Image (cartoon, rainbow, N blue to C red):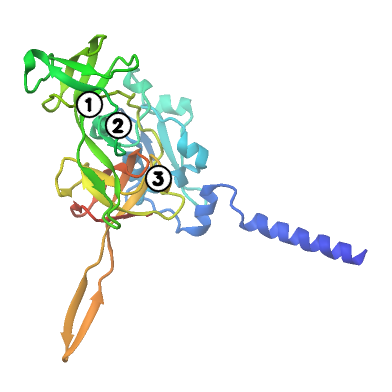
Amino acid sequence: MTTKIRIISVLLLTYSSLLLVWPSSPALAQTAQVPPLELAEGAPDRHIVVPGDTLWGISSKFLKQPYRWPEIWRLNQEQINNPQRIYPGQVLILDQTGAQPQLKIANPIDTLKASPRIYSEDNRREIPSIPQQAIEPFLSEPLVAEEGKFDSAPRIVATQEDRVYIGRGDLAYVTGVKGKAKLWQIYRPGKALVDPENKDILGYEAFYLGSARMAHEGEPSTFEVISSQREIGRGDRLLPAPPADIISYVPHAPGKAVKGRIVSVYGGVGQAGRDSIVTLSRGKRDGIEVGHVLSLLRAGAQVTNWHEDTKEIHQLPDERYGLVFVFRVFERVSYALVMNVTRSVEIGDVVTTP
């Protein structure tokens, strides 16, 4: 009997210990593992949301590290991926009465007292995570495809009046059309995206040329070009246009360690600055999600000095110089918007969990 009581006591003590250390939510887990939240200098007591606000912009008003937005809201993983919507006219209150600061949405009555509102279409639209105008063309237009993706895609075989290139308002004759999509996008297969670390081909980035809609079915089918960003010609391919959704995911750090590289800067240039689009060498299969925020690092150089006829080699530390926000994810790569940087972003720079 005494032996049974001892066993039960040990089990209860073990269970109690697990309860003390087992996190019930990511927010609690982070509280135990990372430094306390640091408020931004001059953080306001409240903020009235207005059209044009973004989650990133608001979090920057309150936090030195904007990607820790889920912590100040006490969000769990489900709420991060399906967050509470924030709309123009709402009042956000900074509560500093507890051990950690917390943001809350004010009572609707308090909101009305704080600021009489004129209701409009903008007031009914939730605010996006990052500036929508900066990324909207990239939500559906740029494409990363595996090798052979375009081999079976509908192809332009002739143009109106047999022109070399066509543009908006012109007609294109397309073979291999399947499906009843109303809007199509026109692409030209582009360069391979190569991982700077192991030289693997991660995919092929296609150039977006414009959009078209079907005018007449057939083989070939007749399409009217309704927008063009580049010249369109024979051999270019068409794909159905996917819907462009508002990016409303909460900015947050990945839940595990991530390390990748900048593969390319969109537009074919070698450097990027704030609000530029960059391609990362990590994607869905690496655990990257829309809303992830990653740090930018410049690898420290190796320097050689001579001291009293002795050769010294020193490895300088990596330099953290900014953040990127992931807004579109493919299987092996992803697109990110450059948010805060103190220097130019270069191909080959490292991205990592902040």
Q: How many marks?
A: 3
Residue at point 22% right, 47% down?
Answer: 264
Q: For mark 2, what is the residue?
A: 139
In the rendering, at what x and y percent does residue 337 appear? 27, 42
| Within-10-Å neighbours for mark 1: few <14, some 14–19, many 20+ | many
| Location of residue 259 in the rendering, given as x and y in whole percent from the top left corner | 36, 55
- The disc label shown at residue 237, or none: 1
Please name the amino acid that badge 2 sits on.
Leu
| Nearest the eye: 270 or 157 | 157
Is residue 95 visible in the rendered image? The answer is no
Picture quarter with the N terminus:
bottom right
Q: Nearer the viewer, mark 3 or mark 1?
A: 1
Q: Is residue 251 left or right of residue 195?
A: right
Q: Nearer the viewer, residue 322 or 117?
A: 322
| Residue 170 on image: x %, y % | 12, 14
| Spatial separation of the CA atoms under disc 3 and disc 1 | 29 Å
Q: Which quadrant of the figure has residue 326?
A: top left
Q: In screen coordinates, is 76 left or right of 142?
A: right
Q: Which mark is residue 288?
A: 3
Residue 219: quarter of image: top left
